[in-house]
Image: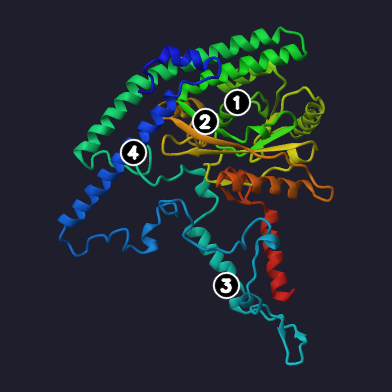
């Protein structure tokens, strides 16, 4: 149903329009998933009723919360199973929430006359909050879980997910086998063809635009061609994108968004033209970067070169100072997160001044997992996973422009923007640095915890 009229559908895609075939395709998939869910529930009930063993695993309604915890420390709905107090965060003076009982744990205590006597003796119960927080982190780590694929509430007929029921009943086996044939032997070849044509078209178009003299005419031509090319490329993953609040769409300045995968760029470029900033890559990504740089001003840099990063900040200021330049797209997290949370925003892009346009991107994992685990998969492997998924369905919210307050530092401004994006996208707002994916916790964070603990001992 997705590609009954592939030629006409792609022709319409080339001018940034849609016939609604993909949304019809998504509606059919939702009905198919619901049919599969009902059969899974029926099969499980039959298995429980046929079993006469008294030691049978209890039903989900009777199971204790601890039995629902998965191997990665979270339950099936990706909600926290621990009501924790954030006393081990990177900023303990901001995270630590003291209750009245915890205040009494401090060494300082009141006398009958209302005076405070200070006793600096150490007792074992003084460190129990930290011990408990450490045990909670071992059971359910807030950081590690955001770099793994999001768990699903129900099976989506893909064996790469954490739920696999393809051999539970013969009906599910037939549906799964038919889906496998459709995805790998029909959709995949067609999507690869669309991808190859789209990349070739991108290279040719940017090369032609690069020959034009700088000015408004070149910018208008680049905007038109960019929308056509990226809308065409979005068909290679059957992207179904819903944009909200178009009145707040970035027109200039800096656009910041939460980061899930390189597809984030494709999703946003289907609706508007942006300049990009990021790490310089080799291979296939490097080819695309060089092609894009011919037609529009982009900023590529090496993360390992500190001096180059200072030059990036200077070029960023120069870019936003030119009114006719397109808005520059930045992902302040600096790494890909699994679209369940938003991690610490780097303050660099919030120090240059100018208007900040927040954008929240939320993917629907039922049709395909858009998260790129770069430590496990290469770029081409990731693209193959995307092209063999059912579709990529997401919502994009353009949020009102934000400005830095006169008495607000860059870190506070970044946290304020991050909170707005997390709230609109239904994501968890975390203070942790996303670079913990690649490095150990900073020494400064441990020292802050030690300082906070010493204050508690002193009764401060």
Q: Residue at x 62, y 14 (%)?
A: 225
Q: Residue at x 40, y 53 (%)?
A: 70
> Can you tell which of label 1 and label 3 is closer to the viewer?
1
Q: Nearer the viewer, residue 291 or 339?
A: 339
* Mark 4 residue crowding within 10 angstroms, few (<14) / some (14–19) / many (20+): some
Separation of disc 3 and disc 2 at Cα?
48 Å
User: Mark 3 — residue?
Assistant: 128
Mark 3 crowdedness (10 Å alpha carbons): few <14, some 14-19, many ≥20: few
Q: Nearer the viewer, mark 3 or mark 4?
A: 4
Q: Are marks 1 and 3 in contact (CB under 8 Å)?
A: no
Q: Are marks 1 and 2 in contact (CB under 8 Å)?
A: yes
* C-alpha separation, residue under disc 3 versus residue under disc 4: 47 Å
7 sits to left or right of 44: right
**In x, y percent, where is residue 412?**
74, 50
Q: Residues within 10 Å of mark 2 (few under 14, many from 20)?
A: many
* Label ID, residue 427: none
Nearer to us in this view, 189 or 354: 354
- Identified at 23% across, 43% down, the residue is 168
Q: Is residue 69 visible?
A: yes
- Residue 415 versus residue 454 in the image, above or below: above
What is the spatial separation of the Cα atoms under label 4 and label 1, in whole angstroms?
29 Å
Closer to the N terminus: mark 1 or mark 2?
2
Q: CA distance from mark 1 to mark 3?
A: 52 Å
Which residue is disc 2 drawn over?
A: 241
- Which residue position holds label 4? 33
Residue 390 shows in this picture: no
What residue did someone put label 1 on? Answer: 271
Q: Is residue 85 above or below residue 112?
A: above
């Amino acid at each position: 149903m997705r590609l009954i009229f592939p030629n006409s559908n792609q022709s319409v895609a080339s001018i940034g329009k849609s016939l609604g075939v993909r949304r019809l395709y998504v509606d059919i998939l939702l009905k198919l998933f619901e049919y599969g869910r009902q059969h899974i529930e029926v099969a499980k009930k039959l298995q429980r009723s046929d079993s006469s063993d008294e030691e049978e695993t209890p039903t989900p309604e009777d199971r204790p919360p601890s039995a629902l915890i998965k191997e990665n420390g979270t339950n099936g709905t990706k909600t926290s199973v621990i009501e924790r107090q954030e006393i081990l965060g990177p900023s303990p003076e901001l995270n630590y929430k003291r209750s009245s009982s915890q205040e009494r744990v401090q060494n300082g205590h009141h006398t009958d006359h209302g005076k405070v006597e200070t006793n600096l003796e150490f007792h074992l119960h003084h460190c129990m909050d930290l011990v408990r927080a450490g045990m909670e982190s071992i059971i359910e780590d807030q950081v590690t879980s955001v770099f793994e694929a999001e768990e699903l509430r129900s099976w989506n007929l893909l064996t790469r997910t954490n739920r696999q029921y393809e051999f539970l009943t013969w009906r599910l086996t037939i549906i799964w086998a038919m889906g496998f044939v459709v995805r790998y032997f029909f959709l995949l070849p067609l999507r690869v063809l669309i991808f190859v044509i789209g990349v070739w078209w991108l290279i040719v178009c940017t090369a032609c635009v690069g020959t034009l003299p700088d000015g408004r005419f070149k910018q208008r031509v680049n905007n038109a061609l960019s929308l056509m090319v990226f809308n065409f490329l979005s068909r290679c993953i059957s992207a179904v994108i819903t944009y909200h609040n178009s009145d707040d769409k970035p027109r200039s300045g800096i656009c910041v968004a939460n980061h899930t995968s390189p597809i984030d760029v494709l999703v946003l470029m289907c609706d508007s033209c942006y300049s990009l900033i990021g790490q310089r890559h080799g291979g296939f990504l490097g080819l695309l970067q060089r092609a894009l740089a011919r037609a529009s001003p982009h900023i590529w840099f090496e993360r390992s070169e500190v001096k180059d990063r200072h030059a990036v900040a200077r070029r960023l200021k120069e870019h936003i100072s030119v009114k006719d330049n397109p808005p520059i797209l930045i992902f302040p997290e600096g790494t890909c997160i699994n679209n369940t949370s938003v991690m610490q925003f780097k303050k660099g892009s919030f120090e240059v001044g100018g208007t900040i346009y927040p954008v929240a991107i939320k993917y629907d994992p039922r049709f395909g997992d858009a998260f790129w685990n770069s430590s496990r998969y290469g770029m081409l492997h990731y693209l193959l996973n995307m092209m063999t998924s059912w579709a990529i369905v997401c919502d994009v919210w353009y949020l009102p422009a934000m400005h830095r307050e006169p008495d607000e530092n860059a870190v506070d401004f970044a946290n304020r923007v991050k909170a707005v994006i997390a709230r609109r996208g239904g994501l968890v707002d975390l203070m942790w640095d996303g670079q913990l994916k690649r490095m150990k916790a900073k020494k400064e964070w441990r020292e802050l915890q030690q300082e906070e603990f010493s204050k508690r001992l002193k009764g401060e």
